Amino acid sequence: MARILIVDDSPSQLLGIKRIVEKLGHEAITAEDGAAGVEAAKRELPDLILMDVVMPNLNGFQATRTISKEDSTKHIPIILVTTKDQDTDKVWGLRQGA
């Protein structure tokens, strides 16, 4: 069983993704914005992070960059879960560490 951190500011999206993760037999940890996601990643050291992009405080690109550069969390794979699907968004996400 993997420990998966889900970072999303939408309560309905957060709940929906959490249900999917738990139905697949994994443990879900949640955070409501990018800043909380960075703190949860440092504290919980999950096996995987599912990250929204458009969020208050710290957006998903900024949170991904912070997590992927921090020594204690840079090994954690991050998947961006977002409706931002332009090629520039994909390239930017990869450059941030997703």
Image: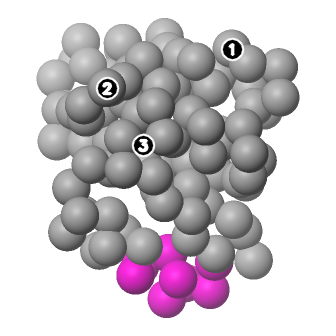
- For this view, does 43 lie left or right of residue 92? right
Q: CA distance from mark 2 to mark 1?
A: 19 Å
Q: The disc labelled 3 sits on which kind of residue?
A: Met
Q: Which residue is mark 1?
A: 69
- For this view, does 16 lie left or right of residue 69? left
Q: Which residue is mark 3?
A: 51
Look at the numbered disc 2 and give the secondary structure of its residue.
loop
Q: Earlier in the sequence, mark 3 or mark 2?
A: 3
- The residue that appears at 51% across and 26% down in the rendered structure is 64
Front disc: 2 or 1: 2
Look at the numbered disc 3 and give the secondary structure of its residue.
strand
Q: CA distance from mark 3 to mark 1?
A: 16 Å
Front disc: 3 or 2: 2
Q: The disc labelled 2 sits on which kind of residue?
A: Asn
Q: Which residue is mark 2?
A: 57
User: Magenta segment range?
Assistant: 19-26
Residue 29 position (above or below residue 86): below
Circle 1 residues within 10 Å: few <14, some 14–19, many ≥20: few
Q: Please identify the quarter of the rendering in which residue 18 is found.
A: bottom left
Residue 98 position (above or below residue 26): above
Q: The disc labelled 1 sits on which kind of residue?
A: Lys
